[in-house]
Structure formats: structure tokens, C-alpha cells
Image (cartoon, rainbow, N blue to C red):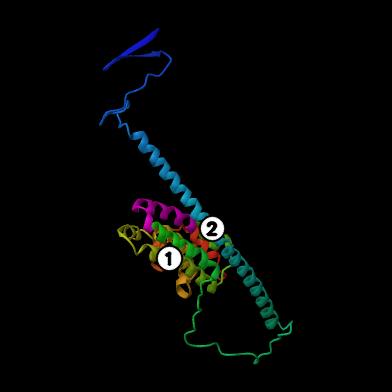
Amino acid sequence: MELWTEITSDSSLRVRADEDELIPTPPPVRGAKGPDGGSVFDKLIEDYRALAERAEDMVFQHVCGEIEMELRAHFFRCVEMSRIQNLGLMLMFHVLFEYHSGTGFYSHTPGQHDEEPPTGPQPGYEIEIPSTLMVPVSLFSSYLVYFQSSLSTRMLSDLYRRITARISNMVLQKIIFQRGPGRVSVKEGRAIATECELWLETSRAALSSGRAGGRTVGRLVEGPWRRLVEAGRLLALQGSEWDRIKTLTFGTTGDDDWEQAILEVAGFSELRRDEVQTVLRTRVDS
């Protein structure tokens, strides 16, 4: 069976179409609805949305890949420094054992080598940012500044959350959680705390200036860094605060009281109790 359509203008035109062929659909009029009741532009909008999401994923993977590559040297340095410190501690304990037992070269005779402990406030350690960390942090800052100048507020917020969440978790795992028990000295704990704060301060500095979108994102800048900064601040605790947090964390104190104590000393309470225990165990004096 054949279908016939006649279009009349100045002259008659006969157009033929078989049943198995698609009859051309006339162009939609303005305001027309699609077969499902939606706008005829919905498919086009969906295509552009998928394209934007794909582009955002590519930017996310590229930025994180570059920063992670630059961080490898820093992670390697931290592991090597930890090994050197552990060898130094083992040697120190061996020397002290021989010194007090009288079995080695440093035999101790009462009245000799006895000195009064120093009194008064002791000078604090001067924490320096290692050069292996400055390169990835500078790269991270450059990307944030560029994104703020070229992306919309929503895209900037989404990218910032995704990138910082990945970097924060990676640094937390490599620098703290995977170090093992008794691997971090008090001095190194303070250095780790400084590094953790550096990531947060870099984000604040990069997003604090610029257009209004940057100020909007700036209010949420610390969110993805809270777990990392909290772990660093716990590692830097000393004296009575360190003893108090150890007692509360490993003791039978209720979770509410424990969380309030963590909040007082660290400013955040994002880590679970078992995670805080892991952080505290990395210290040599845990």
C-alpha cells in the first residue's frame, strides 16, 4: 500500500512515501511540546549538561593527577625521614642503656655527668616548610586562582569540593594513617600540623580575593580540610592537653564528653574515635 501526499502552491507537487520509510517531520513551532510533554529543547539541554559534567570530570582528573604526581617526592621524603629518625632513636636508646648499665664505653659513676635539668621556658622548634611540599601547594593555589577567574560559582564550588576532598584524604592517609604506631616524634608532629594548616590557608588565600563568587565559596573553604587539620593538630599536642586527650580517647569516657574535648583542643571533631586512636598511636609517646 502506498501513501500519497499532495502539496499545493503555485504548482502542484506530489510527494510519495512508502510505509517503511520515515515521513519527514515538519519543524516545531515556537512553544511546541515534545511527545512526552516536555520542551522540544530538553534533549539539547541534556546533551549540554552531560558535556559540562564530562568537562568537569576531565578537569578534576587532570588537576588531581598533577598535584598527586608532585606530592610523590614529598611522601617519599616523609617516609625516609621517619626511617632515619627511628634509626636515631634506636641508637640513642642503645647508648643510654650502655651508659646507665655500665656495660659500654659510657659507664656511669655516681657524681659524674650529673647536670641539673634546664629551667625556665625552652625555645620552641622552628618549623620550616619543606621544599618538596611547596611545589604541589603552589600548583594547587594557581589552579584555584585560575578557576575563580574563569568559572561560575557553582562549577568552582563543585570542583573545589571534589579536588580538596581527594587531596585531603590522600595526604591524611600517606602522612598520618599509614605511618604506623610510634613513628612520629613531637617535633615531627608539629611539622605535620604546619603542613596540614598550609593547605587550608592556601585555599583561603586563593579564594578570598576576586569576584563575589569567591567570597561565597570562601565561607565553605575549610569543610574538606577539617579531617586533615584535626589530625595534624592532635599530633602537635603537648603536655597536659596531650595527656588529657590520650586518657579520654583510650579510656571509658562517653562519646559526647570525648567529642567536646576534641573540639576544644583541635577546633574540629570530624574524625571517628577509632581514627583518633590511630592518629595518637603514631606518636612515639603514645
Residue 105 as seen in the image, left or right of residue 154: right
**Along the line of sight, which residue is nearer the eye, 30 or 70?**
30
Find residue 22 and report its image quarter.
top left
| Residue at 43% from the left image edge and 15% from the top image edge | 20
Name the chief secondary structure element in magenta. helix
| Residue at 32% from the left image edge and 24% from the top image edge | 26
User: Residues in magenta?
Assistant: 148-168
Q: Residues within 10 Å of mark 1 (few under 14, many from 20)?
A: some
Q: CA distance from mark 2 to mark 1?
A: 17 Å
**Along the line of sight, which residue is nearer the eye, 78 or 253?**
78
Which of the marked residues, 2 or 1, is nearer the chain's N terminus? Answer: 2
Residue 149 as seen in the image, left or right of residue 189: left
Queried whether the magenta region covers residue 184, the answer comes back as no
In the rendered view, tell whether residue 70 sits above or below residue 43.
below
The amino acid sitting under disc 2 is Glu
Can residue 269 be seen in the rendering of this structure?
Answer: no
| Residue at 44% from the left image edge and 62% from the top image edge | 142
The residue under label 2 is 68
| Residue at 42% from the left image edge and 17% from the top image edge | 21
